[in-house]
Structures are given as structure tokens and as C-alpha cells.
Image (cartoon, grey):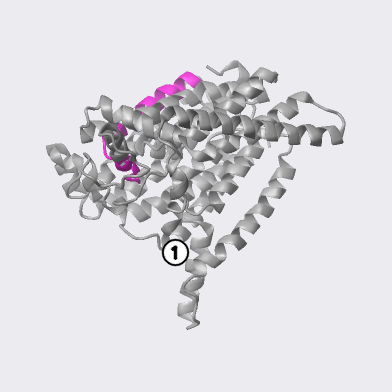
Amino acid sequence: MNEPAAAPVGRRRVELIAATALGAAATAALSVSMYGYLADADLWLRYPLGRALARLTGSGLNFGFAFCGILALTAAWLWLGRVRPAIRETMLILTIWALPMIFGPPVLSRDVYLYVEQGWQLLTGANPYTTGLGQGGPTAAMVQHWVGTTAVYPPLTLRIQQLVVTIAGADGYASVVGMRVPALAATVALAPICAALARRVGTSPARAVWWAVLNPLTMVHLVGGAHNDGPMVAVAALALLVAYRGTAGSFVAAAALAGVAGALKQPGLLFAVAVALIMLQRLDLPDRRRRWLAGAGLVAGAIAIAALAFLAVSALCGLGNGWLGTLSVPGSVVTFTPADQLAALIQQVGAAVEIEVPDDLRQRLVWPVRVVLLIALALLIRRYRRSPIMLMQSAMLAFTLAGPAMRGWYYLSGITLLGVAGSRRVLAVGTGIIVMTLTSEGFQETARVAYPLGSGLLGLTLGALAAVAAYPWLWPRETPGERQRVS
């Protein structure tokens, strides 16, 4: 497919400004929409502006603001992909898009209140692994649905949460806004890391940065939601970059960084496998048998080093490994996992034709769905066996889909680096996943419904349409002259 000729400088500038303005309006709409479903005790209702915005969006308008915001943000991002901003332009756009959300309520998730509560527990001398939530912290009124549960996150993340609450003086509003700092820092750090990774694999650095830091999933769930997946993904990406140096020392350092990523959030440990595959690729062994033996040894070594680093960081944090006893908590609720949606579909069809469906159908479907995903992953491994980054992103997406629960921010570990090595077709699929999860979550959060089948099907339909429609707009891996305009 021939690439379109570059737009004249004047037209490009107009399009760049227009797309940036559209994205800023979108993030503002998303932030405003969140006032429409604040709880009575929410922190933002202390202030006149917060109460005014809550009244504005409290009569069903929050749904319209949120949905229009999601679609407009996606359109602005894809428009920028067609304009192809340089890295400096992308970082300026990130700043402009982030500003409307930084001081507003958390977007499409209330997990940040949980982070503050856990940080407050540590500040008061309690251990979140042994002390249930809702014990009187500054956000206790906003974590009622978590009351009595204990922390699921690794120790390093809990210590970061404690640091934020300490700096904020245990003030609820300042602590919630402060929780965005680690997520924003991770988003900014992804820019040079992704650019360097793209140079390593011979693709466009500017494209890699545009995809990683401006995609709607990053904007909504890192900037807007302050989720702790951001630091994990940034450290994991740094591990891959270090691994590309191809020395024994860099292998050890990269595997250790994967362990640190795991200490931020457990899936980060899986990036140790990608570290091993990158090292194997750098060795360039001609004999197939030697490649298999070396690969097995490198994978085992990387996992061992990552595990040791994880344990060392955990020991330094001094909280123990109480999260091991809470691994079943995320799976105790119905979310948008394939098993959940398939079970909901079968139950609705069964009810329509008056066929009795087992109450535990969801649990029965979990492993058949995982087997299907495992087969799909095997095919992807064959397809991307020469691309460790694409192989790892495929594995992380499969891991997310096969998990006991699925939230939009879980996709970040399998989406963020697609711009480094993915083809235009891969980015189209990634765009579909982004639209699918954000529209499903937007419907669920703003319409106050409990993960109905309808919201999942709506997201799947819009995601499929977005994947097809976005393809011509997406930035190819490399274009003539692209490498001359990367900063």
C-alpha cells in the first residue's frame, strides 16, 4: 500500500492544533463526567466547583460526557497518528491532554481511593496485608465495597502509596491527586524508553512514543485513573531496553529490573521471559538444538534472577508477602473476562428459550476459555518467534484475557509497546481492544450497571468497527524520511 504524500507544512500545523484541541476537549469531558456519579461523601463535593459540576452532570449527562469523551479522545489520537507528530510535539500534547484530568476525580475507576487508604494504613503503623480496609483513613468513605479486604499489591507499590500519603499530609484530596504523580512519571519515562527500543528494532521512534503515551488507554487509566500498572510497565520496558545491549551484565541487570517491575505489580515478573528471548536473539546461534538449549537456560536464569530481585525488594520493604493470600479477590467479582461474557450470553439465551443453565456456568467456562487462549498464544508464538517484543505483548494480552478478572488498565502491559514493533494491522487490533474496553467500562461506570452482557457486546462491536476504520489512519512501522524527524 502506497503511503500518502506528506501534508504541506501549513496544513500539518492546522491539523496538529485541531487534533490537540479535540483531545483536550475530550479529556475535559471525561473528567467532568466523573462528577456525575460521585458518592455523597466524595472529596470533590467539598468545593463549590465540584458541587456545581456534580449538579451539571448528575441528571444522566455524565453518560453523554463520558461516551463522547472516549470517542473524541480516540479520534484525536488517531488523527495525530495521521499527522505523525515528532517526539517533542507528542510530549507537549501529553501535557495539554493531561491538564484537565490531573486535579479532577479519578476516571472510570475508584482504585485510587484504595491506594490512599493503604498508604494511610502504613502511615499509622498498620500492615495492609493483615488489616482490613475501611478503618478510618481519609478515603474510608469511598472504599466501602472493599471493607474488610486486604491488599493484593506487592510491597514496593504499597511503600510508594505510603510515601504519597505522607507527602500529602494524609489529606484525602491531596493524596488522591498525588497518586497521579507516579503514573504520570511512568508515562513520561515511557517516551525515551520506547523511542530507544524502536531504534533498537529499526522502527519509527516517533510512532512508538505516540502510541505509548497518547493512546486513550494510557490517558484514561494512567493519567485519569492513576493506576499502578504504569510504573510496572515503564520498568518492564526499561528491562527490555537494557537486555538489548546483549552483554552478560546487561542480561543480569535486565532480569533484575523485571523483578523490580514485579515488585510494583506481579505481572511484571513475566517480562523476564522477554529478557531471555532478547538475549537469545543477540547470541544469534546458527544451530537449532543449541538455540533451544541456550533458550531454556536463559529463560530459567532470567526467571531466577527476577525472582531473587523481587524477593530482595520485598524484604527491603519489610511487609512480608501477604498478597499471596489475596490472589482470589480479583476473581470474586464479575467483570469483562471472556468467560464472564460467554456465560452471560448463554444464560440470556437459555432464559429466552426456557432452558435451565447451571448457576456455576461462569466457573465451568474459565478453563475451556483458557485452553482456547493458550492455543491462540501458541499460534502467535509461531508468528512472532523472531520478535521478542511482539511475542511478549501477545503473551501479556493472553495472560490478561485468561485472568480471573479483567479491567481496562490490565491491558496496558500488553498494549503499550505495540507501537515499538507492531505492524499497522497489529495496531488496528490494538485500537480495537482500546475502544472495546473503554466503551464497555464507560457504559458500566457512568450508567451505573453491573457488567451486563449488553455493555460487553457494545464494546466488542465498537471495538471491531474501530479496528477496521482506524487501519488507514494508523502510522506504519517506518516511512520514507521518518528517521530524519524523530525529535
In-front residue for pair 458/287: 287
Magenta span of residues: 87-114
As shown in the figure, which amino acid type bears the numbered disc 1?
Answer: Leu
The spot of residue 79 in percent (x, y) is 48, 35
Number of numbered callouts drawn: 1
| Residue picked out by circle 1 | 453
Residue at the spot x=55%, y=25% of the render?
238
Q: Is residue 148 visible?
A: yes
Q: Is residue 1 left or right of residue 211?
A: right
The spot of residue 304 in percent (x, y) is 63, 33
The spot of residue 163 in percent (x, y) is 32, 27
Give the dominant element type of the magenta stretch: helix, strand or loop: helix
In-front residue for pair 198/289: 289
Q: Neighbour class for label 1 at 10 Å: few (<14), some, many (≥20)?
A: some
Where 456 sits versus 149, above or below?
Answer: below
Residue at the spot x=24%, y=27% of the render?
168
Residue 99 counted in the magenta span: yes
Where 169 sits versus 68, above or below?
Answer: above
Quadrant location of residue 225? top left
The spot of residue 348 in percent (x, y) is 46, 73
Quadrant location of residue 305? top right
Q: Is residue 86 visible?
A: no
Tag 1's secondary structure?
helix
Q: Is residue 298 left or right of residue 408?
A: right
Q: Is residue 143 left or right of residue 341?
A: left
Report the residue that reaches farthest toward the bottom: 354
| The N terminus - image quarter | top right
Report the residue that reaches farthest toward the left: 48
In-front residue for pair 272/59: 272
In-front residue for pair 470/460: 460
Where 447 sits versus 260, above or below?
Answer: below
Residue 350 counted in the magenta span: no
